[in-house]
């Protein structure tokens, strides 16, 4: 009775493989007809698009003789394969690929809905953002990307509900990076005290696997800037790109130009202690006024001011009290008054990010049926 | 192209009138064809169901000669009027009426979707809960009731997403009553101290309009018990009714039987100071172990234990740090590990409750189209 739904999935990394696991456990899951990783694509054979790829057993599915395999397909080839399926189709992009994200309009105009944790499509040039949503309207397709901010936390859906119901969002503020959350919660805890130097805390986070392979990819604030770009646009601000507002980098200028090779990274880590004095000064300046320092992003909707960087917070504030590598996002609105609507919890990790993707997928399926 | 959608709204109290205001500002709002309050019903005339009732101007719409007015209609009459509309229809129940809630299955079986902040249908006998969702499936109608817990905060949607994507929710815990939040945040603040007696804090809350007209309707814990019943059921527990688990009442036994008349309420407030010693003892017992006392609800999914009552919390915990009359809800799950997913903010008030209703309405419309 209801429209059959077909699914293409790209990416089998940390989030991708967690997603496929969740998909395999869904009752009435849509038919998985395409599964691609960098150099390989697995396809249910056209024109019947049957048999589907067994999600529970995708690693060995490649050996199933009734499935088709090929090398990497272009976005256009994937779109044309999916749009010819005998029903509605959905592309789940579990990569962080900018080229694929730039092709979302191609998929959407052909009626293929998009579900993704990939920030690139929504945080690059404003023209791409506009093209994505115009193409979705044109192709009567849907775009859900909850996991691009705060992983599985209900951040974008909450903001969209506030806006759609006519609330006036005045300010959005929060800690949007699990890595930077951990660094500052450890370096400058709100209760108790820590004698660890900044470079030691960075080294510890790197060892625990909390940072990117090159910690400068966290310390430069760009990941936070991309998330702020997405939030600001949903709140109605026409932010041109993550480069169009001030982003404070925590990379000492002297170390910024070291190459991103393992050698360059090792040099960066070795020389970071030379700059501990700067971060200690920042920490102590906050302590002298009874506060703690945190790396936050904020959007002031009225003044259209978006910024990413260090800020001081009262020790009994929710941001100061954050634990571990949690994210926190506060929405100040006309209806909520002085006490913001707050969402808090793990904002990174394969399972919780995949959860946001799976939840989005279920919503798209409900709307396409 | 898309199915026309017709809307019936019952209740024009605090939440109801805020909802109608939000409805009036929606782009592409569905046609309002029925608006009812206790003794009066305004209808768009059948069989054309046109003209619709102007939401922006509903108070004077009653004088519009092309609309039909009548006295109170029965749920069956309303269902039959709505189901005969030339499209899909939605009933928004902005009352707290138990009789109307008991009739949801009648609406749903006729294909009329339900959107409501009315807790009664979802927190009474388990048989009604089951009948509601079975009837919805039978009539291919939808039921959204986000505002029954935490008003406009994303509580139920978050829990449903966790469950639907296969996470294991192990524990839900929180402050679910704005009134009780205010009472304890004021009586036993986490930072600083208060010398106010319990009865003084209750009197202050009553004056500020934070309590029900009879404060015992807050202090008996039943509102929290109803919310816990709803959450527990979504988490998969077959809770028979809010009376089937322990609920601690803060009404001194000696004052429970005073009538709910204005005289009885006055007597209650006058005699409450006699029992201040009990609450002071509770507060001091917590202080002696460095904690504060809060009135919380909790669900342990594994042991199926649901309880509502006083509990002690560390002063630096999120629950202890709550401000004003905010709610806080923590979801502990397998995926989120030790640090729960937390939602916090105003959990009562006309505007934010109506926002939850309007957001639900928009989701139902998206799915019916």
Image (cartoon, coloured by chain):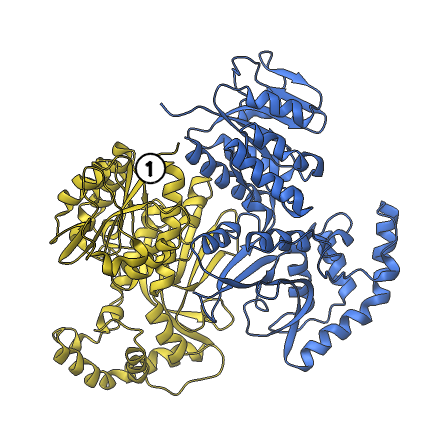
Chain colours: A yellow, B blue
Residue wearing tag 1: A4
- Dot 1, how many residues are within 10 Å of its Cα: few (below 14), some (14-19), or many (20+)? some
Give the secondary structure at mark 1: loop
Considering the image in quadrants, where does the C terminus of chain B appear?
Answer: top left
Tell me where residue A72 appears, x and y as whole percent.
Answer: 12, 53
In the image, residue B144 above or below residue B264: above
Examine the rendering and report whether any part of residue A304 can be seen. no
| Residue under the point 59% across and 24% down | B34
Tell me where residue A228 appears, x and y as whole percent.
Answer: 32, 56
Examine the rendering and report whether any part of residue B232 can be seen. yes
Tell me where residue A311 appears, x and y as whole percent.
Answer: 37, 68
Query: Which residue lies most toward the bottom here?
Result: A195
Check the residue under mark 1 and report the chain it is in: A
Front position in the image: B35 or A281:
B35
In the image, residue A263 above or below residue A25: below
A229 relative position to B137: left or right:
left
Image quarter of residue A194: bottom left
In the image, residue B153 above or below residue B95: below
A21 relative position to A166: left or right:
left
Considering the image in quadrants, where does the N terminus of chain B appear?
Answer: top left
């Amino acid at each position: 009775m209801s429209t059959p739904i077909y699914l293409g999935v790209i990416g089998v990394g940390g989030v991708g493989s967690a997603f496929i696991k969740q998909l395999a456990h869904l009752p009435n899951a849509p038919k998985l007809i395409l599964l691609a990783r960098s150099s390989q694509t697995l396809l249910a054979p056209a024109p019947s698009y049957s048999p589907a790829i067994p999600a529970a057993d995708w690693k060995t599915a490649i050996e199933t003789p009734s499935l088709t395999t090929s090398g990497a397909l272009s976005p256009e080839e994937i779109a044309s394969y999916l749009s010819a399926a005998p029903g509605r189709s959905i592309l789940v992009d579990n990569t962080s690929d900018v080229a694929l994200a730039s092709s979302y309009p191609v998929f959407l105009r052909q009626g293929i809905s998009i579900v993704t944790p990939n920030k690139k499509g929504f945080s690059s040039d404003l023209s791409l953002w506009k093209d994505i949503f115009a193409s979705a309207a044109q192709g009567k397709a849907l775009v859900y990307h909850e996991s691009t901010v705060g992983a599985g936390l209900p951040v974008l859906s909450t903001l969209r509900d506030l806006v759609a119901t006519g609330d006036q969002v005045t300010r959005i503020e929060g800690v949007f990076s699990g890595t930077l959350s951990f660094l500052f919660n450890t370096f400058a805890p709100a209760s108790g005290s820590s004698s660890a130097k900044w470079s030691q805390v960075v080294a510890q986070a790197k060892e625990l696997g909390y940072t990117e392979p090159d910690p400068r990819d966290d310390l430069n604030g760009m990941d936070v800037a991309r998330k702020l770009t997405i939030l600001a646009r949903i709140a109605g601000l026409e932010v041109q790109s993550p480069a169009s507002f001030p982003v404070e980098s925590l990379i000492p200028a002297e170390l910024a130009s070291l190459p991103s090779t393992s050698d360059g990274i090792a040099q960066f880590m070795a020389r970071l202690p030379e700059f501990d004095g700067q971060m200690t000064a920042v920490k102590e300046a906050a302590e002298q006024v009874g506060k703690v320092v945190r790396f936050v992003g904020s959007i002031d909707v009225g003044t259209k001011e978006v910024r990413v960087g260090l800020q001081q917070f009262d020790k009994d504030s929710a941001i100061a009290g954050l634990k571990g590598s949690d994210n926190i996002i506060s929405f100040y609105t006309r209806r909520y008054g002085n006490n913001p609507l707050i969402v808090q919890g793990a904002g990174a990790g394969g399972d919780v990010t995949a959860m946001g993707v799976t939840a989005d997928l279920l919503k798209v399926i409900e709307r396409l049926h």
